[in-house]
Image (cartoon, helix red, strand yellow):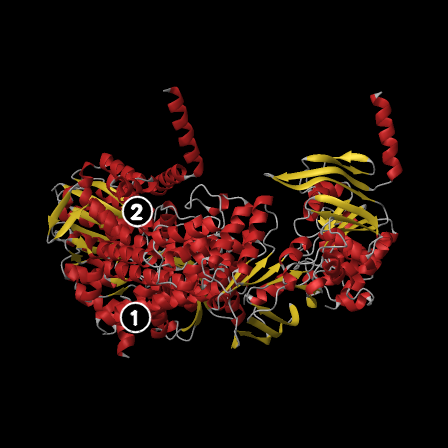
Amino acid sequence: MSILKKLALAAGLATALSSAAMAADGMTVGFSQIGSESGWRAAETSVTKSQAESRGINLKFADAQQKQENQIKAIRGFIAQGVDAILVAPVVATGWEDVLNEAKEANIPVVLLDRGIDGPEDLYLTSVASDQVKEGRVAGQWLVDTVKDKDCKVVELQGTVGSTPAINRKKGFEEAIAGSKNITIIRSQTGDFTRSKGKEVMEGFLKAENGGKGICALYAHNDDMAVGAIQAIKDAGLKPGSDILVVSIDGVPDIFTAIAAGEANATVELTPNMAGPAFDALAAYKKDGTVPPKFIITESKLYTAADDPKGEYERRKGLGY
Amino acid sequence: MQDTVNREQDAADRATGYRMEARQVSKIFGTHKALDGVDFGLLPGEVHALLGENGAGKSTLIKILTGAYQPDGGAIFVDGEEVHLTSPLQAQTYGIGTVYQEVNLLPNRSVAENLFLGHQPTRFGLVDRRRMDREARVLLKRYGLDIDPSSELGAHSVAVQQIVAIARAVQLSGKVLILDEPTASLDRDEVQRLFEVIASLKRDGLAIVFITHFLDQVFALADRVTILRNGRLVDTRRLTELSRTDLVRKMLGKDIAFSGSTSLEAERPPTELLLDFKGYGRKRSVRPFSLAIHKGEVIGVAGLLGSGRTEMARMMFGIDPADEGSVTLSGKPITVKSATEAIGHGFGFCPEDRKADGILGDLSVRENIVIALQGKLGWFRALNRDEQLDLAGQFGEAMDIRAASLDMPVKLLSGGNQQKVILARWLATDPAFLILDEPTRGIDVGAHAEIVRTINRLRDDGMALVVISSEIDEVVAYSSRVVVMRDREMVAELKGEDINPAVIVQAIATHGENSEFEAEVTA
Amino acid sequence: MMRIPLARLVNTQTIALVGVLLLNWILFPGFFKIEWQDGRLFGSLIDVLNRGAPVAILAIGMTAVIATKGVDLSVGAVMAMAGAVAATLVVGGYPGWVAVAGALTVGLLCGLWNGALVALLDIQPIIATLVLMVAGRGIAQLITEGSIVTFSDPTLVFIGTGSFLGLPMPVVIALALMILVTLAVRKTAIGLFIEAVGVNRSAATLAGIRSRLLLIAVYAVSGLCAAIAGIIVAGDIRGADANNAGLWLELDAILAAVIGGTSLLGGRFSIVMSVVGALIIQAMNTGILVSGYPPEFNLVVKAGMITLILMIQSPFAGRLLTWFGRNRRKGA
């Protein structure tokens, strides 16, 4: 019970035992997950399972191992089993019409998690996703609030070139700092969302900017790159968190360790709890036919040293990040 | 005047009645004349065997006839009209089809698809599968095959695949069919079946070229035979005019006199026994044989291509180890299960295919010479550069290798010098027993003489040698004894006065001459 | 006498390396600046060596494999596996040396597996090693359960980020490995045998070389090198990232060997030149980082530079040079 409770807490779900949740009791839901290609994905899977458990939902889980054909097969399987609802984290954006129409004909509501699809909106009940532009904006706003009117040169570690989160998180951050002439991005390179590339690219930034003396802050599109970069900053003889401010996105456990140690300053959480809001919407829909909004945006919460980083780490470390 | 000549020529063409003809064709690779002014005429309704040892020019001629090669001299005629064949595909349009030993169809497609691939019957732009299967069934019946056209080709025996390949080739071309060793991987019944198909195609008026190593099949099937040797035409004859012995003689060398010289070596008294093979054989490769080899002795091995002579050499050297029988070395029983083990016993082996199995083309002459000795010494007792240069210099000189530098890549040397490098490689290991498989093939006269001299010298120094050669004169000249291989079996061991070309040719050709054809192909 | 070793060092690889370094210097004037900081050397040039070390180590094993006319596509995945094993062991409470030994064992076993497929079952190397390339990363993900296993074991961290005589440990390890393997192949007959098998396996076998054993040994060394690189990469970020560690590095290692003058058709090889090849690749990467160009250009710039280097090394360029040389002499 204590594990369950912890997991429920970890998902940051205040409404765990709301009336809507009670109504979900006994529902059978199929969940077609993309795979386990990243720690966040693994966390999303485990949070979804714990969310279902805490609500008494019977969850049928299918891992597609990065293949759309596996997801389509899984969804057809769910339809054949006559589940009450289906959650899908679609691996690609296209090619869903046929199978989602089949679900629709079978009167099974479908909720998209985390990613959208190209296609008519009536194919699914709702989609739960974060707003990546907003994530970038929250990170940028934190920097604006922190440096106030001091001059600040920022280096940026981008995600994989051309990927949607990299484009959106860059856009959001730039929007937030647009009004502050004192904040400028002086270097921006891709770290491919990985820890080792984050470290390598940061080393390059530090060399290129006079050993890092001119750098005021680092903005990384994900926490992993920030964790790598923090090591590079330390190797260069500087103090991350004070000599160079560090702000990043995702909220993986290791960044909370860094925040607790004063080596990182802030992170914007991309919650792995996409399923909680989805279950709420489904429960309301099943109970009295309440149609949820088409796009449910999850909260992009900012965490700093003031938000009990040690505790946040403890809550997250068991989730499979 | 010119006009008259042309008209006369035209008349002559029509008079020959050749379906396809190659006139004075030549082909040169680098400095090597693979074909030298060869005439070849193919009549409709005949099976024409093309014979010759390796390097005779058979495959070059075939490739010219099918358009895979373009001749450097001479001309090709189809039905009396000169044609320029640029590719096998284009040759098909002149009615020339080829079937190779290795069936090159698509094993995972259906029989019907294989028959019609590229020109399937269509309906509304789509393949009409039902019509295709129906037509395929009719076609297959003509070839005596009652199989389901929609079944996968690969599910059938090689013989059936072979017949399907023939059916496809005839279907596409229809005038000339070239069969390149079609029976090599077939068993007796399958050969029979194939022969029936060929006979019926012959009755239909097709001109068929048939290439094989099996003389019995030539006599069983062919009407005429063309024999090539060293890129030149030896003879074209009706088989009824030719005895088996004559045929072998023509294949192995036109100059062999029947009176023949007897080997000088035959008179030598036997010395100390070195190797004693007893009942030594390998399933589906070489039938068990027994052979005692003494020090200071050259055992000549005669036999046609495909007779098992190379297989015997590979078995003795442990590359394809024997699975029955035993062998002793100086009285002690030994095993020879790998080349490494053979070298450990003091064996050496110059393979038949110099390029594929002999030289290390990109490595230097020096490295090529020391490699076997270094192999013998193992991974960790490395010869340093000076030692290598010493060895290479010493044995290079002994073999009279003409190389600008010992550090040049061996692939830049002439064939003769490459062969000398391989001999030097083995001599550097100081072997007690040396196996040479066709050591003089395809090399120039000077190197040829040098290698024969070396064989004599090594024998006189007390080494035991087994030398495989298609050059009967040569075998006679240096052999102490001659063994004859035929159909993967040692059929004769000749000593003393029997070592002369006439007897050897007789042994290759006549053994089993009276036996039934069916009995032959079981081997 | 002095001219021979010097002349041997002046070749297209070293010229290309110097060229890329000079280009970096033009783009970023501080490129050659090296400082002494916290008991270690610090500067962009050191970064090139340090970051180039994993690929250089892979290239050492890869070169031997390619020289036998093979290729080892699995090295990236083996890196991930070795890192995952090492990290999981230290997190599980085992001492650092056990983790290192465990990771090396995994690398060795992977190499033996590849070698057995190639030498004993005669499977084409590209297919044989593709098996582990695909499966290996999956196994690594199973070991780490899809997450980054973070650790702070001093042994592993030292291997990834420590320094010895002022040089980063990865550089020291790569250098030691380069010297060790070069001696092992050149002071014994192994180098000659590798080239012989690569040029003509059949002829080499007939000359008495135990080619199967040699092939297995070569793939085993490649597996070991991959494991070492995997430990370094994990130690560097203090975590085993099964999804990304060593990803696509097999291609960099192959490229390094090819730039180093080893033909994919087997035969002649030089371990040292392959390491130079790895440094050329890394010098380009580091150059791109310090130059400040937008990341969208990274791959295009890299591809262009590599094309240029390979063109300079091609036989055609060689012929062109001799032709120019002859004409110049004629003109003079």
Q: Is mark 2 on a helix, strand or loop?
A: helix
Of the 4 image quadrants, the one containing the C terminus of chain A is bottom left
Residue C327 falls in image quadrant: top left
Is residue B128 among the parts visible in the rendering?
no
| Label 2 neighbour load within 10 Å: few <14, some 14-19, many 20+ | many
User: Relative to A88, is B358 on the left or the right?
Assistant: right
- Residue at the spot 39% in from the left edge and 71% down from the top edge: A24
Task: From the image, tell me which residue sits under label 2.
Answer: C276
Task: From the image, tell me which residue sits under label 1.
Answer: C102
- Residue at the spot 81% in from the left edge and 34% down from the top edge: B81
Marks 1/2: CA–CA distance: 30 Å
* Residues at marks 1 and 2 on the same chain: yes
Of the 4 image quadrants, the one containing the N terminus of chain A is bottom left
User: Relative to B403, is A8 on the left or the right?
Assistant: left
Q: Residue furthest bottom?
A: A1
In terms of sequence position, does the residue under pointer 1 or pointer 2 come before the other?
1
Q: Mark 2 lies on which chain?
A: C
Vertical placement of residue B329 versus B259, above or below: below
**Rendering coords of residue B516 (x, y %):** 82, 67
